């Protein structure tokens, strides 16, 4: 892996066994990466990057101008997203175990008196986790039948750099907890993406063929996750 600079733009270059050059700009910071064939020399890669400089700057500007989600305080009247829809949080103190109820326009967070922000966040995120766990198994079952592949298990956790990942050996997939904030189509996309990796490890033509076959609109969902990147997180392809 090498690094080239074009003014104040730093570009990570990875050379591997591929036929074509691939350029990508990643949110939220606008970091730039080029994947190039092993035989391509640095000067040729630099010229390619220069030819794409205006496009790189345009993508970086778009990411920098994106509205970022402000840190959550878990207080009444605060906005939270649930599968793509905005709700207002209503914090209700009661002397009983905590719980979360979703109403038509609000989400009710029941907590004991004097519950701090950290504990409220933990309760809320556990609710997110359980909600995701209700929609993921049917998706896995649906695509197991279509793709003729077996998923032994799945998990949900916070991930700083990925929306999903998988263990090919264990046949287990992991999903980012923040998918609970996005439309359900994005969860479906990540499930299919990770299951496709059980069939093909690399992001090559074979992998793309699986995605085209089983989820024809996958590029649309990928772009949607690019545009709605998570605050302060360096998202990259799963």
Image (cartoon, helix red, strand yellow):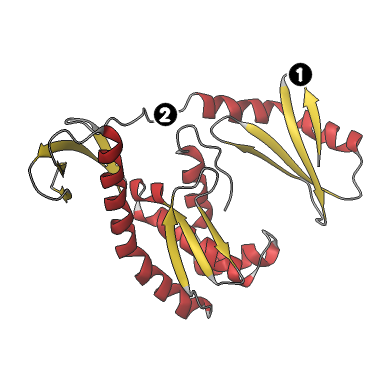
Identify the mark at residue 68; answer none if there is no mark. Answer: 2
**Residue 63 percent location from the top left of the image:** 53, 29
Question: Few, some or many C-alpha atoms within 10 Å of disc 1 (few <14, some 14-19, many ≥20)?
Answer: few
Residue 53 position in % (x across, y down)? 72, 27
- The one nearer the camera, 131 or 18, is 131
The location of residue 71, given as percent across then percent down, is 36, 29
Residue 99 shown left or right of residue 7 in the figure:
left
Q: In which quarter of the image is residue 17?
A: bottom right
Question: Dot 1: what SS?
Answer: loop
Dot 2, how many residues are within 10 Å of its Cα: few (below 14), some (14-19), or many (20+)? some
Residue name at image x 68 percent, y 34 percent: 32
- Horizontal side of 14 relative to 203 (left or right) equals right
- Position of 13 relative to 155 (above/below): above
Q: Position of residue 217 (x, y in %)?
A: 49, 58
Q: Distance between the residues labelled 2 and 1?
A: 27 Å
Q: Say which quadrant the N terminus sits in.
A: top right
Residue at the left extreme, as displayed: 95
Residue beneath the point at 68% across and 67% down: 206
Callout 2 secondary element: loop
Q: Depth check: 35 or 94 in front?
A: 94
Quickly name the residue at label 1: 7
The residue sitting at 56% across, 62% down in the picture is: 166
Q: Quadrant of residue 26?
A: top right
């Amino acid at each position: 892996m090498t690094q080239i600079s074009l003014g104040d733009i730093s570009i990570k270059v990875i050379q591997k066994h591929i036929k074509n050059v691939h350029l990508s700009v990643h949110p939220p910071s606008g970091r730039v990466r080029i994947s190039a064939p092993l035989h391509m020399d640095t000067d040729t890669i630099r010229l390619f990057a220069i030819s794409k400089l205006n496009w790189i700057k345009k993508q970086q500007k778009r990411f920098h101008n994106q509205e970022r989600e402000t840190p959550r305080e878990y207080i009444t009247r605060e906005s939270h997203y649930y599968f793509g829809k905005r709700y207002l949080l209503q914090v209700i103190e009661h002397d009983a175990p905590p719980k979360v109820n979703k109403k038509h326009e609000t989400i009710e967070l029941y907590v004991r008196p004097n519950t701090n922000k950290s504990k409220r966040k933990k309760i809320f995120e556990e609710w997110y986790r359980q909600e995701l766990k209700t929609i993921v198994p049917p998706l896995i079952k649906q695509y197991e039948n279509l793709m003729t592949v077996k998923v032994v298990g799945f998990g949900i956790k916070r991930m700083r750099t990925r929306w999903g990942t998988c263990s090919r050996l264990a046949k287990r997939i992991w999903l980012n907890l923040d998918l609970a904030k996005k439309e359900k189509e994005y969860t479906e996309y990540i499930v299919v993406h990770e299951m496709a990796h059980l069939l093909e490890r690399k992001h090559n033509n074979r992998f793309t063929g699986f995605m085209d076959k089983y989820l024809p609109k996958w590029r649309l969902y990928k772009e949607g996750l690019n545009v709605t990147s998570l605050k302060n997180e360096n998202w990259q392809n799963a």
